[in-house]
Image (cartoon, grey):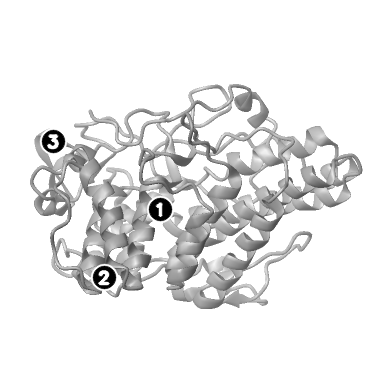
Amino acid sequence: MTPTLPRVALSPSSLIGVAALALAVLASGCDLVGLDDDPNPNGLSLEEILADPSEARLSNAAVGVETSARTGLGTYLVSVGVIGREYWRVSPSEPRFTTDLLGKSEATLNDNTFYITTPWAARYGTIRNANTLLLGLDANQTLSDAEKAGGRGFARTWIAYQYLLNLNLTFENGLRFIEPGDDAAGPIVGYGESLDRIAALLDQAASDLNGGTFFFPTSLVRDVPAAPVDYGQINRALAARVDAYREDWQGVLDALDDSFVGAAAPLTVGAYHVFSTAAGDIQNPFFFPLDGGGDGVLAHPSFVADIAPGDERIGKVEARTEPRTFDDLTSAFDVDVYETPTSPVPVVRNAELLLLRAEANAQLGNAAAAVADLDVIRTAAGLDPYAGPTDTAALIDEVLRQRRYELYAEGHRWIDARRYGRLGTLPIDRAEDDVFEQFPLPEAETSDPTA
């Protein structure tokens, strides 16, 4: 088994104990991806924190934000990856992975089913936790201005990222935003305006982080010698992704200038969700033993059929002893991206940033710069330098191809195909299957009288 997303640093061991005191996820669902990924819910309420907004309680609240952000992550990766035809999530006890998500026999996506309600509620749970941290910072009388600014930047970065993940699911169906202290979310906001508001949140957070300091530990940052990654750089990396979705190509380049992107740095450098087997913590929800006959994730056959000869990223899938057929779907390969139950899952990493820079430069007509970054990715995969046409259309084709293989099973292909109008190029596996453009808003959102 070839690990493709190795850790580049260990998280502080003290975080596991702190996580047991993290804030509760205030809205979550039952994640059916295979493993329990619900952190310890025994946290402090908003009222308790506001009654005593001490440094210790606010530190626990900050750790709780990172902790709760992992809830529902497995279901999110299944939802976007199955529709994006990266893999099939097979489960003898849960047929909806291969019926609803693939549109089998003209099935449609349900607005009250785990594949939307679980990740949606989990993201809003983290947003509420981060809003609670913001309110607690306002009430605190002992922290320095720099410490409060750092906490606000941390919280707002997470809020923006959580909104973005939910918007990835619902697309033109939009989002609802909730302000600190509000009991209910606001009205539904469309896709373009939602992206603008997420970008504004990230910009505000970046301003907070500039000169701010942290009074709490974090587990998200991954470092290597001489290439430290801080939260401000992570914030700008996420801002570059949002600007790509907004088609603000100069904005992508400007954000990347303040991120951790580096052609000479390992492609794995970046920010990751961290997992462990410690009591009270959770394991990687997308890890499955290989060559099994029960719950698992089969690689879509097109991943192997379409890969270039010599591309070492073939190691992201593993040949099975015998092909497996489930629900009229047959694959000879399992997904092998996450090596162990504690393998970290990327939030954003250097490889994505290099490809975002190549995409932005291609869109702006800077062909040489685009090819230079593409060649970093290709060389790392064992491929020759790019020798194809250098017009914008050809370079975007190459960017999307490299994103498909470099970011496999990290939650990008469906979104990439959608933003370039290429959903129709994704394979149809069975007669009457469908490729969906977006998830419906959960029933609870559309039935709300304020929606």
Report crowding for label 1: few under 14, some 14 to 19, many 20 or more residues within 10 A (C-alpha): many
How far apart are labels 1 and 2 at the CA level? 23 Å
The residue drawn where x is 62% and y is 50% is 126
Q: Nearer the viewer, residue 317 or 30?
A: 317
Residue type, label 1: Leu
From this view, report whether residue 17 is shown above or below residue 238.
above
| Res 144 quadrant in image | top right
**The label number, if any, that marks residue 44 in the structure image:** none
How far apart are labels 2 and 3 at the CA level? 27 Å
**The label number, if any, that marks residue 319 in the structure image:** 3
Which residue corresponds to mark 2? 423
Quick one: label 2 or label 3, which is nearer the N terminus? Answer: 3
Which part of the image, by quadrant, shows the C terminus?
bottom right
Quick one: label 1 or label 3, which is nearer the N terminus? Answer: 3
Q: Is mark 2 on a helix, strand or loop?
A: helix
> Can residue 101 be seen here?
no
Residue 239 point in image, percent of width and height:
52, 60
Which residue corresponds to mark 1? 353
Q: Is mark 1 on a helix, strand or loop?
A: helix
Which part of the image, by quadrant, shows the N terminus?
top left
Residue type, label 3: Ala
Residue type, label 2: Leu
